[in-house]
Amino acid sequence: MISQAYRLNEFIPNIELLMYKMFCSPITTKEHRKEMNDKVNLLAGNIFADREMSMHPDVYKSLLETLTMRPNKKHYKKVTEYLRKFEKKEDVPPVLLD
């Protein structure tokens, strides 16, 4: 999937930024997220969390690399919360978190 994304990057510049925007942007309205208490539940309205998807470590690496270029504390918390909630500890390589 990631290799396909990199091939797609030839046609669409910054595919990693697109993935970052998809992951961090909620798909619900602000009022709906407020009802779900998005201060506590950081993944409220997240398209991937709603489907409880497990993603490849390269996707997390891409998201974290994008965060280093566009730092945002809340988005970092979303990525780490997603890792904690939907990935098994043994499936997350330690290099990813370094």
Image: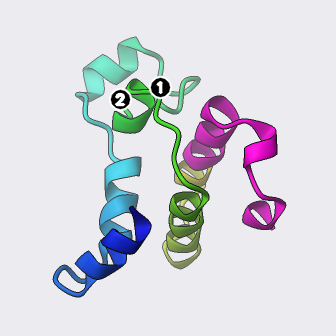
First reached walking from the N terminus: tag 1 or tag 2: 1
Viewed as shown, does residue 97 lie left or right of 58? right
Magenta stretch: dominant secondary structure:
helix
| Residue at the disc numbered 1 | 38
Q: Nearer the viewer, residue 92 or 65?
A: 92
Q: Nearer the viewer, residue 94 or 31?
A: 94
Which stretch is magenta?
77-98
Q: Could you say which quadrant of the image residue 78 lies in?
A: top right
Q: Position of residue 48 (x, y in %)?
A: 40, 37
State the residue at coordinates (51%, 47%): 55
Residue 9 marker: none
Residue 50 magenta-highlighted: no
State the residue at coordinates (54%, 24%): 41
State the residue at coordinates (59%, 23%): 40
| Residue at the disc numbered 2 | 45
Helix or strand or loop: what does disc 2 sit on? loop
User: Is 97 situated above or below 48?
Assistant: below
Viewed as shown, does residue 21 lie left or right of 66? left
Residue 93 magenta-highlighted: yes
User: Is 88 situated above or below 51?
Assistant: below
Viewed as shown, does residue 52 lie left or right of 58? left
